[in-house]
Image (spheres, grey):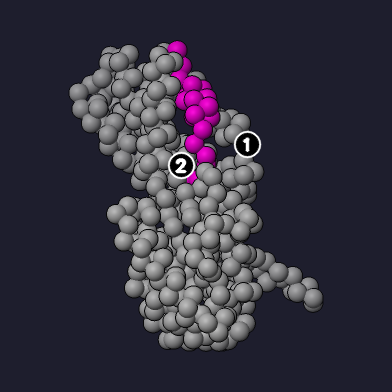
Amino acid sequence: MAKDLGKIIEDAINKAIKDRGEVNVLIAGKTGVGKSTLINAVFQGDFATTGQGKPVTQKTREIKKDGIPLTLFDTRGLELEKYKETFEELETFVKNSNNDSNPMKHIHMAWICIDEGSRRVEDAEIELCKLLSKYMPVIGVITKAVSDQGFRVKVLELLPNLKNAVRVNSISEVLDDGHVIQASGLEDLVDLAMEIVPEAQKHAFVAAQKVSLKQKKNKSHAIVVAAATTAAGTGAAPIPFSDAIALIPIQVGMLASITAVFGFELKKAFLSTLVSSTITAGGATLLGRTIVSNLLKLFPGVGSIAGGAIAASTASALTIAFGEAYISTLSYVLKDKEISEVNETDILTEFKNRFKFSKK
């Protein structure tokens, strides 16, 4: 069983990584507009401090980080007089990328950053928006947003090819008089990005961003529903409880996919411990007979394991309970922390605690 389980976990990890995919985002803006602060506020991994990246054009650099399904293309030089030469080079790169037969190589969206305090939209920003919008959806990100005074409307008028413009203040600031300007707009930016990024890249973007737990949970709920549907099919005819091991690959795959969407690194050792800790000696699913019986009390009318069999409705309900418990666990441990601050032991302990039922 241990060898079989190891193979199940390995296959689940590989599939989860493949299904999550990769997302590529181009971010452009003048020097001092606050791109680095924005990038570090939205995405996990301190991308903006990960060296200088690999040059792909004279003014554009590719930035990646192991374990995060995101590539950023940082475009500079908008303030230069010869920006048109920069743009010609950039367009060649973008066109070649988006003509690649592999969609994972495409640039999936662009963010053009404009400093609200400048109260100006430069010719370079107008030309860049026209250029990029031919190849991908473009969002206007109005940075250092403190006082709108109609500037967002002006941006949308001058850059009509934008999908929308979002006012963002990436970090909280304390002014000299003690007044605090709170961070704002980051979740709106993530929500808008999720609307316009291609469907195949949504899981990758959700995983890479650290702003919205809501988006991570929404995608994870969909994974649970899909797994429950598959589990119900497996149990179309009642499954002898002792043979219900057929549900384990479905449930392990669900765990791996949720882990990936939340943005945690998929480690075989961690997933093995997570799975092993919820399999009991008499367990035909990842939970075991005793915990299964208790879980079913949460779903009146779905069936039971009377006669030692699991029906389709029961298999589905168990999978939902298991998946939702894991989503709840990851949401809890991330409530006030970033992924880099979460201890794997905390996840394991919290997850197991959610299956401690009274014996009444």
Q: Residue at x 43, y 21 (%)?
A: 6
Numbered marks: total: 2
Which residue, given by chain and number where applicable, does mark 1 sit on? 343
Q: Is residue 294 visible?
A: no
Q: Quadrant of the N terminus?
A: top left
Measured in 3D between alpha carbons, the distance from the residue under mark 2 to the one under mark 1, in whole angstroms, is: 16 Å
Question: Residue 231: image x %, image y %?
Answer: 29, 31
Identity of the amino acid at label 1? Asn
Within the magenta stretch, is there residue 274? yes
Q: Which residues are magenta?
A: 262-281
Label number found at residue 260: 2
* Residue 26 percent location from the top left of the image: 47, 65
Type of residue at label 2?
Ala
Dot placed on the residue nearer the N-terminal end, 2 or 1: 2
In the image: residue 238, left or right of residue 70: left
Residue drawn at the location 31% of the way across and 36% of the way down: 228
